[in-house]
Amino acid sequence: MNKLNWMLLGLVLTVSLADCAGSRSYESTGEYIDDTILTTKVKTSILGDSSLKVMQIDVETFKGVVQLSGFVDSSNAVTRAVELARTVRGVKSVNNSLIVK
């Protein structure tokens, strides 16, 4: 390969790697995958609790911070859902937006 081809290859690799980097408002590819796994673990934990109705609770994760939202039947359900989310390994914090209906 000549110098020009090597430079072009280097430029392509640099741009490709830069696209994978995260920032304050964007996740890197690795962070996105980690957050998807955390969301799944939190949903599984909530699903495994017979006192909670998983379909009422929406779970989203961004950079390890779990957001719970939706409508639940009691304040006990709110407390339990937050408690379960906090116990999942890798969760940095839980934002609770659950509403008792």
Image (cartoon, rainbow, N blue to C red):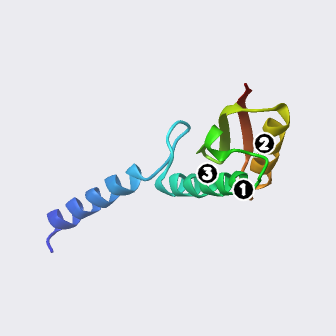
Q: Secondary structure at mark 2?
A: helix
* Labels 3 & 1 near each other (Cβ < 8 A): no
Q: Secondary structure at mark 3?
A: helix
- Residue type for callout 2: Val
Q: Residue at x 85, y 37 (%)?
A: 76
Name the mark nearer the viewer: 3 or 1. Answer: 1
Residue 82, numbered label: 2
- Residue type for callout 3: Thr
Q: Residue at x 65, y 34 (%)?
A: 69
Q: Where, quadrant-wise, is the C terminus in this rendering? A: top right
Q: Position of residue 71 (x, y in %)?
A: 68, 31
Question: Where 6 sits versus 56, above or below?
Answer: below
Give the residue number, with chain letter if any, for mark 3: 39
Q: Quadrant of residue 34?
A: bottom right
The tag earlier along the polypeptide, 2 or 3, is 3
Q: Position of residue 27 (x, y in %)?
A: 51, 46
Question: What distance separates the C-alpha of mark 2 from that of mark 1?
Answer: 11 Å
Say which of 2 and 70 sits in front: 70
Residue 45, numbered label: 1
Q: Is residue 46 left or right of residue 77?
A: left
